[in-house]
Image: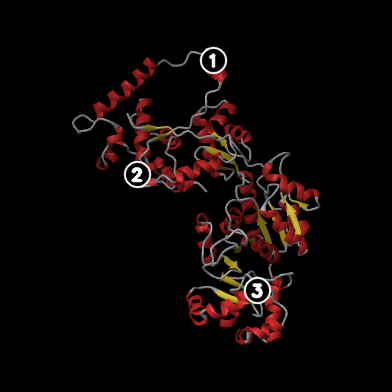
Amino acid sequence: MQNQQWIYKDFRSENGQESLQNTINRVSQALLDRIDLCVETAEVGFSEMHKKEESESSAVIRKRVERVHRIQRERYAGLGYCFNSQITGADMDRFCHLDAACERRMAQKYEEYGFSARTYNRTLKLARTLADMDGAGNIRWEHLEEAIFLRSPDKKYWG
Amino acid sequence: MKYEYWMASLHQINGNRRRQACEIAGGAEKLYHLPEKEIEKLHIFSENELCCLCDSRRHFDLEREWGKLEEKKVRFLPFSHREYPEKLREIYDPPYAIYVCGKLPDPAKKSVAVVGARACSEYGRSVARMLGKTLAGRQVQVISGMALGVDSAAHAGALSCGGDTFAVLGNGCDICYPRSSGNIYRNILDGHGGVISELAPGTKPLPYFFPMRNRMISALSDVVVIVEAREKSGSLITADCALEQGKDIYAVPGRYQDALSVGCNRLIEQGAGILYDVESFLKNTNIVEQRKKKEGKTDKLPLEKEEELVYGSLDLSPKFINSIIDETDLNLLTVLHALDALKRKDLVQETFQNYFCKKL
């Protein structure tokens, strides 16, 4: 699908946030911009590891991923690419069209988070994938909201 | 002026002694031309200081150094200058001269210093920002040291509502240190206050300049507020100076055993004022004319049920969105919606990607 990246944060120490910031400050923003997804994961505790609860099996997840892949392949048939992450700039408006309300709200978010053109487009593509998983034809606000939640770390926003 | 500048550049020598020598000699210019023997006869300087003074007379290129200073947009105010702040004149060891970029604090207005830890918590940052904003909103000048953490937050708060704020630095006032405060530095110089230092332009920050700077911060203000301080903290030096200079000291209390609040709690134990409510602080210190009680955020704004739930699960230290989801038993989208709405109502801030806390 899209390249994914997990950055592990340790917030247990008092200076966790600061040391993480120091680390990320050394990484160029252009590199950070190229990360599609960022999910913070907590350490798995002993009791959680030993939970007997049945979790979703990989086979089920695989089916879901394949379904979304199929949707994308059909949509991009004949265009020379087959995944959302590859949508070209010229096709952006065609496949990641936002209605007026969504666009207005995205404009606010763009300011708030200091997106770059690159991160903005990446967020739209990610929202496209979320919409596909939902089986939705058009990107809705909730997809955008979730895509923003999964955005890559941005140092401009901290302070 | 050139000679005054030469004299001011000798910060290895005690300021009071320099002033005394100049008075006796009849000005810095006369002292510059006085033979070494004569200066020795004044019995003011120690051997080392005399050595340093005479050395600098040989090496200090008056014309060139003065030319360099004039090129920079820095105002040079020696002790004898009429614009030299009265408040600084009054202290025990006033700086021989100060350098100013931008404005000087208006003596007709009240000033409050807001200082604290560099490695502060989000709580300290929020309190400092809120204090800066509230004070500046009431035409009080906010003075601080532009350091990371509390100091910067106080400046930022004051700037956010267009108030005047003054930064006293432990390095030359043409250098922005720390660099991360660049935005604040430029905003201050953009007509919202001034940057003050007793060190010549171009002086790099050194550890022992900072205690010197702290005495100026307290000297320039009427009240000193310490937001967060560890048991051993530079902010406590500011408090000590304030005590010596007879200023009011207020400390923001912290929780039992919070390492970052030990210094503050101890100050309160020793008799400093406690700042737990801005309105009563303003009333007790008499720094602003009392107005009728302003409508606070605590006066209930209408919140949706989910917003209420999410808001209730937050406090002043940032919380990761997953914990909010766990605590409220709502799904991700509902929580995101609620947080978005709360952000727009200015009740919540995102301090870090997907970390949220209440806004003061």
Query: How far apart are labels 1 and 3 at the CA level?
Result: 73 Å
Question: Which residue bears the numbered disc 1?
Answer: A50
User: Image point 68% across, 49% down: which residue?
Assistant: B229
Q: Residues within 10 Å of mark 3 (few under 14, many from 20)?
A: some
Compared to residue B89, the image places residue A66 above or below, namely above
Query: What x and y, as percent, mark residue A124?
Result: 36, 38
Disc marking residue A119: none
Q: Residues within 10 Å of mark 2 (few under 14, many from 20)?
A: few
Tell me whether marks 1 and 2 sit on the same chain. yes
Question: Which residue bears the numbered disc 3?
Answer: B49
Q: Is residue B103 visible?
A: yes
Compared to residue A108, the image places residue B157 above or below, namely below
Q: Is residue B97 left or right of residue A146?
A: right
Q: Quadrant of residue B36?
A: bottom right
Which tag is nearer the camera, tag 2 or tag 3?
3
Disc marking residue A118: 2
Which tag is nearer the camera, tag 1 or tag 2?
1
Which tag is nearer the camera, tag 1 or tag 3?
3
